Amino acid sequence: MEELWQGRFQRHNMETVAQSKTARISPRKVMLVADVIRNNSVQQALNTLTLLRKRSATVLIKLLESAVANAVNNAHQNKDLLFIKRIEVIEGPFLKRFRASTRGRTHPYKKRSSHIKIVLEEKNYGTKS
């Protein structure tokens, strides 16, 4: 049974997806770090993220490790051949808050959140891609 599954997954390039919904960090801040690791191998991206001193790097590390676990356990892919095909960062819902100001006034602001999606694919070195 295991051989049937492995044969099925090895014939096609499978994409593996991991998503984080409503991460409490601004999408602009996440995009800065996501642009650094886009189109890298998984190992190279993890090394880069561990060295970055940005708060969004820790969110992306957790998400990338989740995507790798999905690829290895569910799609039976090789961890060493995986690379980041796509990273999508879009704005999630925001919380409307107000700051008290002088003379009984308030100043509104938004606490932004983001939806992050990482798509991994196994790189085939034998074929042209």
Image (spheres, rainbow, N blue to C red):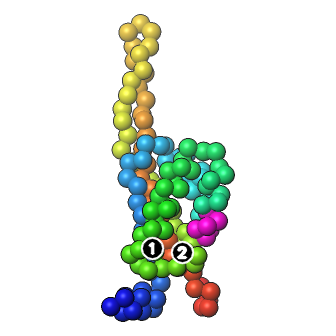
Q: Which mark is residue 31?
A: none
Q: Which residue corresponds to the image point at 62% horizontal and 53% vertical from the top-left?
A: 50
Q: Quadrant of residue 73?
A: bottom left
Q: Which residue corresponds to the image point at 37% horizontal and 88% vertical from the top-left?
A: 2
Place of residue 34 in the rendered image (x, y in percent of width and height, measured from the top left): 57, 56
Which portion, as a residue range, is magenta? Answer: 40-45
- Distance of label 1 from label 2 (alpha carbons): 8 Å
Classed neighbour count for the residue bearing mark 2: other residues with Cα under 10 Å, few (<14), some (14–19), many (≥20)? some
Q: Which mark is residue 79?
A: 2
The answer to whether residue 62 is above or below residue 119 is above
Q: Is residue 44 magenta?
A: yes
Q: Quadrant of the C terminus?
A: bottom right
Place of residue 84 in the rendered image (x, y in percent of width and height, measured from the top left): 55, 69
Classed neighbour count for the residue bearing mark 1: other residues with Cα under 10 Å, few (<14), some (14–19), many (≥20)? many
Place of residue 38 in the rendered image (x, y in percent of width and height, measured from the top left): 59, 64
Q: How many marks?
A: 2
Mark 1 secondary-structure assignment: helix
Q: Which residue is mark 1?
A: 71
Residue 1 in the figure: left or right of residue 126: left
The answer to whether residue 21 is above or below residue 118 is above
Place of residue 87 in the rendered image (x, y in percent of width and height, measured from the top left): 51, 62
Amino acid at the residue labelled 2: Lys
Mark 2 secondary-structure assignment: helix
